[in-house]
Amino acid sequence: MILSHRSDTHFVFELDVAEAEAFRWILAQYPVDPEGAFEVSRGLDGATMESASETLSLSMADRRHQLRSAVDVFLKDSERFRGDESEAVRQLTVGVEEVEWMLQVLNETRVSAWRRLGSPEDFDEVERDEDASLGFLMEVAAFFQTALIYAWSPDSWDDEDDAPGDDPAL
């Protein structure tokens, strides 16, 4: 996934056919953990913890629904990936306003897979088939996160005045 063009409103990436399919695939995996496992704080008392956990769960469920809807719209857009079947490269256009939700989806996918693995410190412990597929999910999500962060990063711009948006730092 190579950034080929950027403007104030969008980024254009070039992906080979396998990368384009992998990008569609990783977005389609969202959410890895539909229920989520978000911890509020370990220092709260029982009633406060229960209330805060319930509020967080409701908020995250709503956000996951919004992100899933954005993913569905993105994946159904037949104009998103350009290039005919005979070409080895696809062009992907991503609006500046889409980068944030894509990064959220990719990060939550990566972190959810890591949690399902038991939050390992050392990936040499990942041996079983299911663990390997979750590890693969993490790696694919991280690959696309890196490409999107690079595109958005002011350090990747030749001239900082060309950076998109009012605040180029996420």
Image: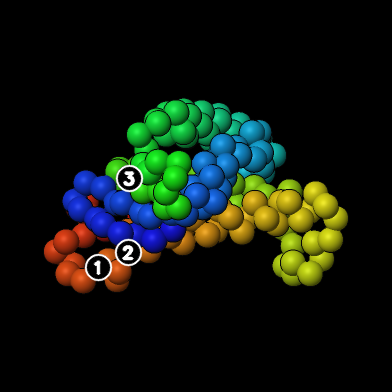
Amino acid found under the numbered disc labelled 2: Ser
Query: At 54% across and 51% down in the image, what residue appears?
Result: 18
Query: At 31% across and 51% down in the image, what residue appears?
Result: 12
Residue 118 position, x and y percent, is 76, 54
Taking the view exactly as shown, the residue that stands out farthest to the front is 86
Residue 46 position, x and y percent, is 69, 39
Secondary element type, mark 3: strand
Residue 22 position, x and y percent, is 55, 48
Secondary element type, mark 1: loop
Which residue in the structure is indicated by mark 1? Answer: 157
Which residue in the structure is indicated by mark 2? Answer: 153
Q: Label 1, label 3: how many angstroms apart (C-alpha)?
A: 18 Å
Left or right, 79 with respect to 66, comes to left
Figure quadrant of the C terminus = bottom left
Q: Nearer the viewer, mark 1 or mark 3?
A: 3
Query: At 29% across and 71% down in the image, what residue appears?
Result: 155
Q: Nearer the viewer, mark 1 or mark 2?
A: 1
Label 2, residues with CA under 10 Å away: few <14, some 14-19, many ≥20? some
Which residue in the structure is indicated by mark 3? Answer: 93
Front residue of 47/56: it is 56
Label 3, residues with CA under 10 Å away: few <14, some 14-19, many ≥20? some
Q: Nearer the viewer, mark 3 or mark 2?
A: 3
Amino acid found under the numbered disc labelled 1: Trp
